[in-house]
Amino acid sequence: MNLGKKEGIVVVGEIQKREIMPLTLELIGAAGKLSKERDLSLSVILSGCGIKEEAKKLYNYGVDEILCIEDEKLIEGHMQLHHDAVIEVLKEKDPKVILIGGTASGRVLAGKTAYAFDTELVCDASKLTYDEKQEQLIITRPAFDGKNMADFVIDPSLTSVITIRTGVMGKAEYKEDKQGEMLYVHPECLKEERQDLIYHGAAGKSGKEVHLDTARIIVSGGRGMKGEEGFALLERLAEKIGGEVACTRPCVDAGWMLPTQQVGQSGISVKPKLYLAFGIAGAIQHMTGIDADCIISVNNNPRAAIFAYSDYGVVSDARKLLESMLKQIEEGKEFL
């Protein structure tokens, strides 16, 4: 395989429904700044089926190389094969820094990659700074309490594997003049007959695909929904207003929802236009994952912490209010 330049910075891009996800451009933005500071090449890896034309769009974002892993076996849900292919290319590429999106798939890939390189992993970076004096990459991320920031350093002799959540870094700047080189690569793992492939879709409890990272409207629930029946009401509301359903960690722990729908410090970061919070107390671990233009919350406790983060708040039983809203929507009244 011709893999171009070595010992640079590599971004692992993400594609959904044959479209480059906005998070990929955020990773390129962070990598671009770092590549200039450290005078390193910037490459992007994309893997999928029918993605060649989409991959060419990255020419306009200041990357040096686009490594396109194109194969009919790489349907979106075959996470395992995607990861095997990407890691094989990364091993051959031997970069100094690897940036991966902090999505459900990205977190798994990051762990596998760190293991493959026998190196350390830092998740959920919010800032990357290169210290020229110490010749070290400083990785800033939220501390465990979610209120403070902490700096981490990976041994410079090792490859740095870092994940970044959606909405944390600015997107790479679009440039009219195209640059870079397209390299079509075909890892050895794709040539093998595989019997162990399992389809992994980003599905929620209802079985529908979940795309919280790009959702404009999110309808989220907490313990106040009191079980799966409460979340069924949220599903109905989301369907009627064109939103996605999310939840807090206790709801996942209780088995009401799946990890793909968890928002917060140990879940997914989101950046919607509107975040509707029903029965959510407002713990910092959940709120650190939300960067919304508008938050509207419903809680029966007037002293709930969620109200301090909200643009609008309603003191009410979340399930009862939801039932009333759904009834009025079905009668033809509009809320949004």
Image (cartoon, rainbow, N blue to C red):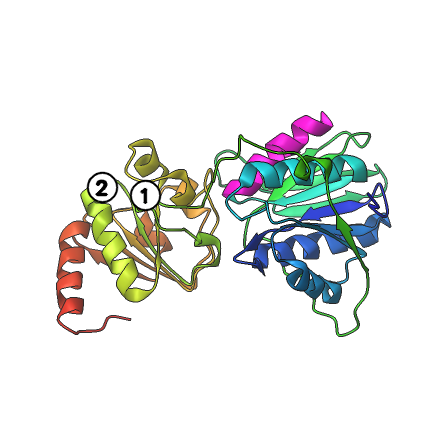
Contact (Cβ within 8 Å) of mark 1 with mark 2: yes
Residue 298 shows in this picture:
no
Q: Is mark 2 on a helix, strand or loop?
A: helix
| Residue at screen point 60% across, 49% down | 72
Q: What element carries label 1?
A: loop
- The main secondary structure of the magenta stretch is helix
| Part of the protein shown in magenta | 104-122
Residue 63, image x, y percentages: 77, 58
Q: Which label belongs to residue 228?
A: 2
Quadrant containing the C terminus in the rendered view: bottom left
Instruction: Kindly identify which residue carries mark 1.
Output: 205
| Residue at screen point 53% across, 48% down | 76
Residue 76 covered by magenta stretch: no
Which image quadrant for residue 51?
bottom right
Residue found at the very far front of the displayed protein: 193
| Residue at screen point 14% across, 57% down | 323
